[in-house]
């Protein structure tokens, strides 16, 4: 492990699979290699299009679901891209972000006093409200798995929800609070970050307005390898 990396958590998987199709955004059909199982439905816990990762024949990592009574008995964990595995399960985003915010040497917010998850702001419920001295910092988390020409881009599909969150953070700044967005970038081949203007001009516009209003944006790069997630660095 390179000295710059820091282990975040272990995210296990139970089998390798091959992508077949995606009948809707919540379900993918795969062929599981060992044990040999054909046309198995797995849950896709990521609202993105993921067409650059979920295409016919691509290799995947899947995990057996533990809660009984589910329609899908497997969860999608990661997809292969070149020689790397890319985490594509947003169910882990909150735990990853909590780890970041709890590590003052890693977190762009530094040492904080307390972290409250799922707090209501305006018409939205944002991921965290962080207290640091006399500061209230609203924090929203977004996952990023799309890259073009070494630039990580968010979103990979239009997101009215994401735009609304940025608008709420602008309101928080106007009310005297602080605000930040942590982009969790799961592509080790990314060198830079940018909002995806071509995919979602509305989100891009709110991003620019939020930046002008003083909302902070932090793209945090991670690598997923051998079941372990590592923090790499903050991108520019």
Image (cartoon, rainbow, N blue to C red):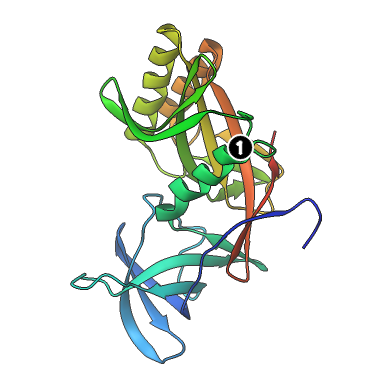
Which residue occupies the extreme bottom position in the image?
36
Q: In which quarter of the image is the N terminus?
A: bottom right
Image coords of residue 205 (percent x, y): 46, 21
In this rendered view, identify the residue nearer to me: 139 or 155.
Answer: 139
Residue 196 visible in the picture: no
Count the numbered circles shown. 1
Residue 171 visible in the picture: yes
In this rendered view, identify the residue nearer to me: 50 or 236.
Answer: 236
- Give the residue pinned by disc 1: 219
* Residue at 36% in and 61% down: 44
Mark 1: few/some/many CA within 10 Å (<14, 14-19, 20+): many
Is 106 rendered above or below residue 30? above
Image coords of residue 48 (percent x, y): 41, 50
Image coords of residue 160 (percent x, y): 33, 32
Determine the image quadrant of residue 123.
top left
* Residue at 60% in and 32% down: 218
Determine the image quadrant of residue 108.
top right
Q: In which quarter of the image is the C terminus?
A: top right
SS class, disc 1? strand
Determine the image quadrant of residue 192.
top right
In this rendered view, identify the residue nearer to me: 9 or 70.
Answer: 9
* Residue at 44% in and 58% down: 89
Image coords of residue 43 (percent x, y): 32, 65
Give the side of residue 208 with respect to residue 190, left or right.
left
Is 74 rendered above or below residue 203? below
* Residue at 32% in and 79% down: 40
Which residue occupies the extreme left position in the image?
69
């Amino acid at each position: 492990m390179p000295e710059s990396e820091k282990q975040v958590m272990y995210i296990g998987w139970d089998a390798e699979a091959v992508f077949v199709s995606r009948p809707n955004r919540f379900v993918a059909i795969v062929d599981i290699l060992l044990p040999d199982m054909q046309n198995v439905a797995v849950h896709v816990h990521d609202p993105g299009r993921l067409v650059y990762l979920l295409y016919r024949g691509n290799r995947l990592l899947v995990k057996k679901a533990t809660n009984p009574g589910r329609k899908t008995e497997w969860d999608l964990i990661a997809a292969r891209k070149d020689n790397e595995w890319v985490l594509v399960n947003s169910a882990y985003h909150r735990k990853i972000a909590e780890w970041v915010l709890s590590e003052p040497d890693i977190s762009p917010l530094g040492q904080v006093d307390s972290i409250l998850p799922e707090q209501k702001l305006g018409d939205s419920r944002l991921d965290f409200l962080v207290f640091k001295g006399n500061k209230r910092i609203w924090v929203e988390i977004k996952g990023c798995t799309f890259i073009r020409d070494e630039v990580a881009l968010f979103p990979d599909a239009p997101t009215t929800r994401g735009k609304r969150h940025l608008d709420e953070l602008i309101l928080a700044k106007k009310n005297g609070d602080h605000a930040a967005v942590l982009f969790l970038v799961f592509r080790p081949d990314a060198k830079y970050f940018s909002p995806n203007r071509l995919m979602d001009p509305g989100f891009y516009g709110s991003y620019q307005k939020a930046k002008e209003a003083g909302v902070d944006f932090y793209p945090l790069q991670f690598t997923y390898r051998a079941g372990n997630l590592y923090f790499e660095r903050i991108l520019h």
